[in-house]
Image (cartoon, rainbow, N blue to C red):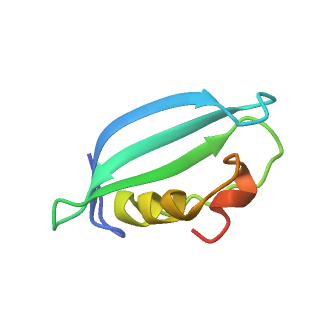
Amino acid sequence: MTTEATEIRILKEGSCPSSSGKSELAYQIGCNEKDEIQFRVSKNSGNGFFNSGWQSLKSIMALLEETEHQITGATLLPL
């Protein structure tokens, strides 16, 4: 499956609980034309805010390596 607008080839789709455990998040893992791994949250069963844009593994890892505290939704806001 490929999304033409973002040129990301979807490799996997799945779901998991949100960090609060109050809702279920649907996610996609993809790959761009440079073979860089990309992630995105595609749906939220609850009322919580989420960004459905693609985020690179590289940018996620860089942010998490700088994080000294417990990871929360707020931790990922810069993405």
Front residue of 4 and 61: 61
Q: Is residue 58 left or right of residue 7?
A: right
Q: At x 43% / y 58%, what residue is drawn?
A: 61
39 on left or right of 70: left
38 w.r.t. 20: above or below: below
Percent coordinates x, y for residue 5 in the rendering: 36, 70
Percent coordinates x, y for residue 50 in the rendering: 68, 55
Q: Nearer the viewer, residue 36 or 61?
A: 61
Relative height, residue 69 to residue 32 (above, below):
above
Task: Locate the N terminus and report the quarter of the image it occupies.
Answer: top left
Is residue 13 placed above or below 37 in the rendered structure?
Answer: above
Residue at image x 35%, y 63%? 58
Q: How far across and how far down the image is residue 29, in percent? A: 37, 45
The residue closer to the viewer here, 70 or 3, is: 70
Report whether 5 appears left or right of 72. left
Question: Across the whole image, how many numbered discs are drawn on residues?
Answer: 0
**Which image quadrant for residue 79?**
bottom right
Residue 3 at x, y = what percent?
Answer: 33, 58
Furthest-left residue in this view? 34
Report which quarter residue 67 is drawn in: bottom right
| Residue, far front | 68
The residue that appears at 63% across and 36% down in the rendered structure is 25
